[in-house]
Image (cartoon, helix red, strand yellow):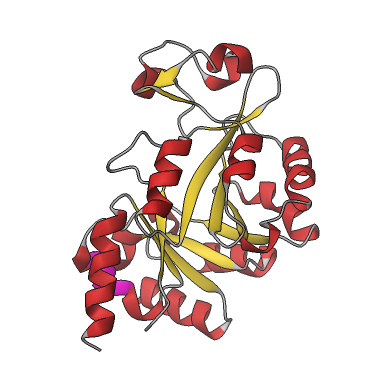
């Protein structure tokens, strides 16, 4: 059976459970995910937590931002009955054999925070299965120095008929993976995208796509993806099994 691409739960099993909560991560693994993707922000008092948006309102109904709220205050806030976990709680929860992609959020994290988070993660039992990614590539330098896998996150606009800016970033940071937006590489069939994929494969850099939520998008990148990040864990796991079974 073809092991790749890995099925990675986006913020846990986001389609069915409150995102970035231990419940979403637990259910993702329970339903067969090979790994999970999550986001790290910093509270007002310097605690690293698992949360995507800078604003609290969309998920919690509470006003304010992560950076303006203390950890004690955040622990009182629920997302559909679930607590916002700290980075430590997540690390204590993750099984050793599961892949985890931790995205560093530039809204609240600095280069100094990157050093501190690298120190927290370095002795963790799942060290070999941790990938650190960010749109702010400078945050990844400390992790590269400490032996972590790093992934350069790219947006659609990074590939607007130009290959050199993203390629130069790859050359500069020498990442383990590039984490690419699925729409840009399925809706756009330009030479820029095709050439970039070819160069990544020649350089033996892993390719991970986000956010893959349809079987059609899965099929489009199936042959060269190391992993796909998805909200719909069961849908794509079942589709992958069917594809592998049919050869």
Q: Who's the residue at 60% across and 58% down the image?
A: 131
* Residue 12 visible in this rendered orientation of the protein: no
Quick one: 210 or 82, which is closer to the camera? 82
Taking the image as shown, residue 214 lies to the left or right of residue 110, namely left
Q: Quadrant of residue 44?
A: top right
State whether residue 111 is above or below residue 161.
above
Q: Quadrant of residue 112?
A: top right
Q: How many numbered marks, from 0 up? A: 0
In the rendered image of this protein, does residue 36 appear above or below residue 194?
above
The residues colored magenta run: 217-221
Tell which residue pokes out farthest to the bottom in this image.
247
State the image coordinates of residue 130 (x, y, percent, origin top left). Answer: 62, 57
Please provide percent x and percent y for residue 193: 38, 71
- Horizontal and vertical percent for residue 38? 50, 44
Residue 75 in view of the camera: yes
- The answer to which of 159 and 10 lies nearer the viewer is 10
Q: Name the spot of residue 133 as percent of width and height, x first.
A: 58, 53
Quadrant into which the C terminus falls: bottom left
Which SS type dominates the magenta stretch? helix
Report the residue at 50% width, 32% height from top.
51
Q: Which corner quadrant of the image does residue 23 belong to?
A: top left
Please report the residue visible at 55 percent of the width from the left and 55 percent of the height from the top: 100
Q: Quadrant of the N terminus?
A: bottom left
Residue 93 within the magenta-colored segment of the rendering:
no
């Amino acid at each position: 059976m073809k092991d790749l691409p890995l099925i990675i739960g986006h913020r846990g099993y986001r389609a069915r459970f409150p995102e970035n909560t231990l419940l979403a991560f637990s259910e993702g693994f329970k339903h067969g995910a090979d790994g999970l993707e999550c986001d790290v922000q910093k509270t007002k008092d310097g605690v690293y937590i698992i949360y995507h948006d800078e604003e609290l309102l969309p998920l919690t109904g509470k006003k304010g931002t992560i950076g303006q709220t203390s950890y004690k205050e955040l622990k009182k806030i629920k997302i559909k009955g679930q607590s916002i976990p700290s980075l430590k709680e997540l690390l204590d929860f993750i099984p050793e054999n599961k892949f985890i992609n931790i995205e560093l959020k530039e809204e609240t994290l600095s280069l100094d925070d990157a050093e501190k988070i690298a120190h927290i993660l370095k002795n963790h039992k799942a060290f070999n299965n941790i990938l650190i990614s960010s749109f702010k590539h400078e945050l990844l330098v400390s992790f590269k120095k400490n032996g972590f896998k790093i992934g350069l996150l790219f947006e659609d606009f990074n590939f607007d008929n130009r290959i050199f800016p993203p390629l130069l970033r790859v050359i500069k940071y020498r990442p383990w993976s590039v984490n690419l937006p699925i729409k840009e590489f399925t809706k756009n069939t330009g030479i820029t995208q095709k050439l970039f994929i070819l160069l990544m494969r020649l350089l033996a850099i892993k390719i991970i796509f986000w956010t893959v939520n349809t079987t059609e998008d899965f099929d489009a990148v199936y042959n060269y993806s190391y992993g796909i990040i998805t909200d719909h864990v069961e849908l794509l796991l079942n589709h992958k099994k069917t594809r592998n079974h049919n050869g």
